[in-house]
Amino acid sequence: MRRLVPLAMLLAACHGKSGSPPVPQAPVSSASFTLRTSDGREVGHGSLQQTTAGVLLTADLTGMPAGTHGIHLHAVGQCNAPDFASAGGHFNPASKMHGFRNPAGHHAGDLTNISVPESGALRVELLASGVRLGSGDGTLLDADGSAVVVHALADDYQTDPAGASGTRVACGVVQR
Ligand SMILES: [Cu+2]
C-alpha cells in the first residue's frame, strides 16, 4: 500500500492544470536549399521535409562531378566561397564523433554517400533520422541555421570529423 501514495501524488500532478499558453508559432515542416559550387555555379536544389522518421532530404543535382561524394548537414547556414569553411562542422548537437561506423558516433548531420553518374545528374533522397525542423533543441533551424554540403570524396563513415571526404565542392544554405 505504501507505493500507492507516490503514485497518487504523481497522478494528481499529471491532472493539474498546466496553465501554459498555446505555442504561438506553427511548426516548420519543410525547408529548401540551392547547392552552388565554389565558382557560384548552381548544381542542384532540394527540399527538407519533416516526417515521422526524421527529416527527408530530396535534391535534384545537375552538373556535379561524377563519382561518390560525402554529403552532410553542416552546423552553420553560411556558404562563403571558395572553401565553404563558413558552414562549420557537421550538425552535431549531441557532441558525438563522426561516422555511422564510428563506435563513438555519429553526428546527427551525417548522411549516406551519393554516387553521381557521368552525366552529372542525380536525384537524391536521404533520411536524416536524428534531426528535425521547427523550434527547440536539435532543430536545423536554430539561431545560426544550417547548410547542406557536398564533399569531393566519399565519406568512409568512420574518420573524424568528416569521413576523410575531402574538400567541400558544393554548399547550400537551408532556408525556411
Ligand atoms: Cu561534411
Image (cartoon, helix red, strand yellow):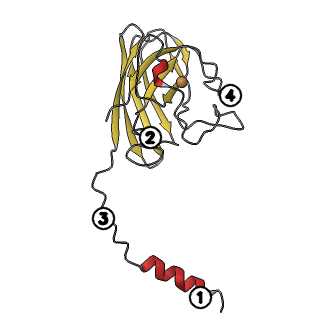
Q: Which residue type carries mark 1?
A: Val
How far is mark 4 from mark 3, CA to CA? 45 Å
User: Which amino acid, mark 2?
Assistant: Val
The image position of residue 8, as x and y in percent, is 54, 86
The numbered mark at residue 5 is 1
Q: Which residue is mark 3?
A: 21
Identify which residue is drawn at 45% across, 29% down: 76
Image quadrant occupied by the N terminus: bottom right
Report, in whole angstroms, how far the alpha carbon at label 1 lies from the one at label 4: 50 Å
Q: Earlier in the sequence, mark 1 or mark 2?
A: 1
Please give the residue where the numbered disc 2 appears in the rendered image.
55
Label 2 vs label 4: CA separation?
22 Å
Q: Is residue 83 left or right of residue 107?
A: left
Q: Nearer the viewer, mark 3 or mark 2?
A: 3
Q: Are marks 4 and 3 in contact (CB under 8 Å)?
A: no
Q: Name the residue beneath numbered marker 4.
A: 158
Coordinates of residue 71 in the picture (x, y in percent) = 51, 24
Locate ligand 1 by image quadrant: top right
